[in-house]
Image (spheres, coloured by chain):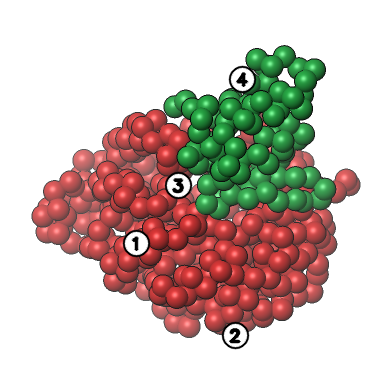
Amino acid sequence: MSSPPNPLALIAELTHRCPLHCVYCSNPLELQARATELSTEDWSRVFREAAELGVLQVDFTGGEPLTRPDILDLVRTARLAGLYLNLITSGLPLDESRLDALVQAGLDHFQLSFQGAREDIGQEISGTKSHAHKLRVLDWLKHRRIALTLNFVIHRRNMDQLPEMLALAESSSASRVEFAHVQYYGWAFANRDCLLPTREQVTQSIDFLKAAQRRLEGRIRIEYVVPDYYARYPKPCMGGWGRKLMLITPNGDALPCHAAHVIPGLSFDNVKRRSLREVWESSDAFHKFRGESWMQEPCKSCDRRVQDFGGCRCQAFLLATDASATDPVCQFSSHRPKVDAILAAVNMPLAQASACTPASTDTAARSRASKPAWLYRPNPSGLAIASKKLPTL
Amino acid sequence: MSIEPSSKPRFAPGVRLGESQGQRVLLMPERALRLNGPSLEIVQRCDGKRTTQEIIIELQKLYSKADPHKVESDILGYLTLLQKERALDFE
């Protein structure tokens, strides 16, 4: 077999520790403990091997990457290796001098996450009071010459704040804003019934953001990730399995995507035992869904297979219990009725009145409504997750 | 959105030239553009000192066999693309 094209980006999950407990966290339900985290030296080697392999950019993420005490060393070694460095952070562990030290160490791009436009929703979603501090970080960033992206994860509970979120971005020094609908894996899958937006919300948000894109062209680039349950075709997940991206978990497991741990029978190589090139070229997990030979109908003979690569393997497993099935959000999938049934339940008039759907523009109405029974993501030490069952299909 | 001939393009924060496996690339937040001969000649001149007009004149000399009008419209098209990507600031 010929060797695959080289990966372009490395997602470095430096730790699963985090001061936030977001109900849609993309980390797996089974979080990795601090004691198992890769050392500074391990990561330094990974960065060098990544650059040699042709990787251009590395995303420092987590958990909260700033909880690593060696974060400045990691920034320096990634830059020294020749990588472009994106830091994806809650901003919570930052003060001004630490921010200066990060910029000084060579950080290229700062990506600050927001849970909403106000403290109330931020606290509900992240289980932490963090919004006020994020606003302080935004202010510090205004006085420094560094690229900034604001990242808003949007869902049923905060979509009515879209105009406020955009105004926040416009008042900041951001050149880029991401409005990313929750994707349903991990914690978000567990909390899906209270996160999925209504059809009306989705339509309104698309109209709003398209207009904003036109208005702000050349000033702020607006990226928009659609909720794929509402799409007719699947997303080209990760740009295709094992085609562009590689994710390293805190303990060094090399994954083709954030959620790959959910797929039964996949075995992952660890960067402590194999080089990044060996992992990329010959790891079972990367081979499994690379190319087209694994595809079934309707993907196998579909013209779109070169565009969307069959969609998301983890979603196929989660919704169709078959990781090599067509992504069930695809209109040609035999499992699409399951997705439609989930959407029907969300869009029922009755559901609008239930505890998890006070998507009202009226703040008073929202505060009167009771908070959903969220399953919060804990820190790696305490895994008290058995109290709520996962949503059934 | 149009580009003034007297404006001086320079890299926006977070944008820099890089190299990978012998290929020059323009690196920016969550994105990278591969640079061929002419695109590299253009971005290397986006230094905040040269005006757009000066860049056009320099490249018309460099590519003297090409139609100068075509060179100008190609450069303006590429600068507009980079502006949309938020890779350039114009001063």
Which chain: red? A
The residue carrying pointer 1 sits among few (fewer than 14), some (14 to 19) or many (20 or more) residues within 10 Å by Cα, namely some
Q: Which residue sits at x=75%, y=75%? A: A272
Q: Is disc 2 on the same chain as disc 4?
A: no
Q: CA distance from mark 1 to mark 2?
A: 35 Å
Residue A181 disc label: none
Q: Nearer the viewer, mark 3 or mark 4?
A: 4
Q: Is disc 2 on the same chain as disc 3?
A: yes
Left or right: where A193 falls relative to B74: left
Q: Do the numbered discs 1 and 3 sit on residues whose CB atoms are within 8 Å?
A: no
Residue B73 disc label: 4
Q: Identify whether A390 is placed above or below A127.
A: above
Q: Amino acid at mark 3?
A: Ser
Residue assigned mark 1: A139
Residue assigned mark 2: A35
Disc 4 secondary structure class: helix
Q: Amino acid at mark 1?
A: Asp
Q: CA distance from mark 3 to mark 4?
A: 26 Å
Q: Which residue sits at x=38%, y=45%? A: A342
